[in-house]
Image: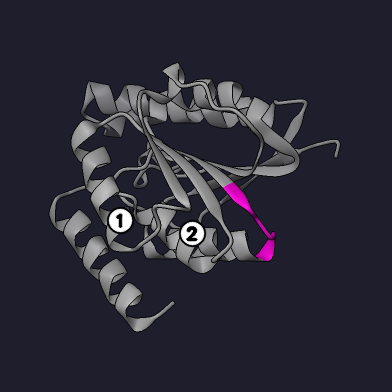
Amino acid sequence: MVDNQYTLLRELKKHAKEENIPIMSDKGINYLTNFVIKHHIENVLEIGTAVGFSAISMALANPKLKIVSIERDEARYLEAVKNIKEFGLEDRITLIFKDALETKVEGEFDLIFIDAAKGQNINFFEKFSKNLSQEGYIITDNMKFHGYVDKDEKEIKSRNLRGLVRKIKEYKVFLEENEYFKTTFSDIGDGLAITERIEK
């Protein structure tokens, strides 16, 4: 990564934090970019672009990587378009402005990265696992959700937050009991689920 790109990425991360836009933690993004390199990932489907931080980070880690990323929030989508253009990555990162659950995506991907509405993780998985290549992986972020998943529900005062945490727990059980995929759970960053097919 050239110095200018590193500086731009650092500024993008700073801006996202100042605006309270959720992006991956440093440890999480380091794991993801190293995963892309280690497993020779050539194409990624990302559910949840936000401002493009993770897509840009992956693209910079692997100069041959192609990414399709879906975002439903118009303001974030438009900012991601601007950021990706600033990095000169328009030819490698394709953005789709739409609700992922209403989006039909063609083709197969070596990696599907789920980092969108946490309450929809099961639906995202069931819909897009059909686009996973035979040797591919699905990585889901925020499995610990800022530590709330490990808390007793009585400690969580917000009803909406309790419901969201319950959905993440249900997703974890869904992954653990899935007979077609095996999942490893990691405490890296905000918690990651790394999923691959049982039979390859």
Picture quadrant where residue 180 is located:
top right
Region in magenta: 38-43
Q: What residue is rendered at 27% in x and 32% in y?
A: 156
- Residue at the far top in the pictured view: 102
Residue receiving disc 1: 85
The x, y position of residue 102, in whole percent, is 43, 17
Tag in front: 1 or 2: 1
The x, y position of residue 155, in whole percent, is 28, 34
User: Does residue 121 appear left or right of residue 50 in this picture?
Assistant: right
Q: Earlier in the sequence, mark 1 or mark 2?
A: 2
Which residue is more in the foreground, 167 or 110? Answer: 110
Q: Amino acid at mark 1?
A: Lys
Q: Amino acid at mark 2?
A: Met
Which residue is more in the foreground, 92 or 186? Answer: 92
**Distance CA(mark 1)–CA(mark 2):** 15 Å
Q: Tell me, for residue 58, which label it has, or none.
A: 2
The x, y position of residue 5, in whole percent, is 34, 73
Q: Are marks 1 and 2 in contact (CB under 8 Å)?
A: no
User: Does residue 7 appear left or right of residue 68 in this picture?
Assistant: left
User: Does residue 16 appear left or right of residue 38 in this picture?
Assistant: left
How crowded pointer 1 is (Cα within 10 Å; few <14, some 14-19, many 20+) is rated as few
Q: What residue is rendered at 32% in x and 51% in y?
A: 23
State whether residue 163 appears in this view.
Answer: yes
| Secondary structure of the residue carrying numbered label 2 | helix
Quadrant in the picture for the C terminus = top right
